[in-house]
Image: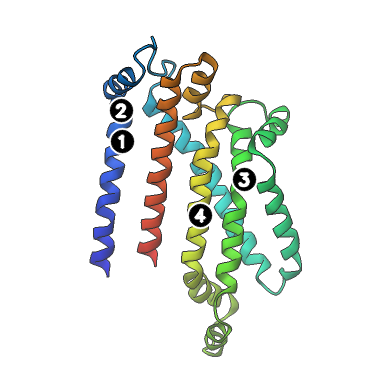
Amino acid sequence: MKERSLRGWIPVLLAVGAYAVLVHWEAGWEAVLKFLFPGETTHLYTRSSLARLVWEHLVLVTAASGLATLAGVLIGIFVTRSTGRSFRPVADDLSSVGQTFPPAAVLALAVPATGFGFKPAMLALFLYGIMPVLRNTITGLESVPEETKDAALGMGMRPWQLLLGVELPLALRVIMSGIRITTVINIGTATIAATIGAGGLGAPIVSGLISHNPSIILEGAVAAALLALLADAVIEQVERSLA
């Protein structure tokens, strides 16, 4: 089982390496985009390197998704305990509201309070990403069979031991699925953060839209799409390894 898990990482790590090479290979990007759009005078985003934009995108998405994961898991644990079950409807409603609000609206509302840049973008992605983690945490914990929990308690486990030693391990795959959904959604949604100066892969997309340059738009869009696919593969492999 361990060897199979390690073998599963080989194509994922190769894909990560290939993506790292690709985002640093500006000459290759320029050659392909020049071939696709020969009529454009500018083919690459000139204000920052693609590698720098990918790094900014990763930092923003990692921070927002990490906070959403932490909050979603903790709230999910709380509302599935006997002391917090009465708050379950409130948690569901709040997470649904965060998902219902368009990220652009959250950005517009957050800018007056937090200013332009990283903070309002992270707030929007956090609110937008918490629901999948929260709902999957609740679903995973509630799917643990009652007889399994009764047997663990009968063996002398305390509630916190039951949670850490039985419930969370059995619910892990469902929780990880929610984390994967949140991360992939946030990678795509983070592209609009460039409109408030948060940088990332949305910068060439917005710049290309303003200047009517499809070459620059494609540079940011392809890099973001490949990053989403790569993140999905990495988290899926983490899920399999932990399982």
Q: Earlier in the sequence, mark 4 or mark 2?
A: 2
Q: Secondary structure at mark 3?
A: helix
Tag 3 residue:
128
Task: From the viewer's side, name the closer residue of 101 and 137.
Answer: 101
| Disc 1 to disc 4, C-alpha distance | 23 Å
Q: In the rendered structure, which amino acid carries the disc numbered 4?
A: Ile
Q: In the rendered structure, which amino acid carries the disc numbered 2?
A: His
Q: In the rendered structure, which amino acid carries the disc numbered 3?
A: Tyr
Tag 1 residue:
20
Left or right of 185, for residue 75: right
Task: From the viewer's side, name the closer residue of 15 and 112.
Answer: 15
* Quarter the C terminus occupies: bottom left
Q: Secondary structure at mark 4?
A: helix
| Disc 4 to disc 2, C-alpha distance | 28 Å
Q: Is residue 149 above or below residue 226?
A: below
Contact (CB < 8 A) between labels 2 and 1? yes
| Disc 3 to disc 4, C-alpha distance | 12 Å
Tag 4 residue:
179
Q: Earlier in the sequence, mark 3 or mark 1?
A: 1
Q: Secondary structure at mark 1?
A: helix
Left or right of 111, for residue 6: left
Residue 43, image x, y percentages: 37, 16
Q: In the rendered structure, which amino acid carries the disc numbered 1?
A: Ala
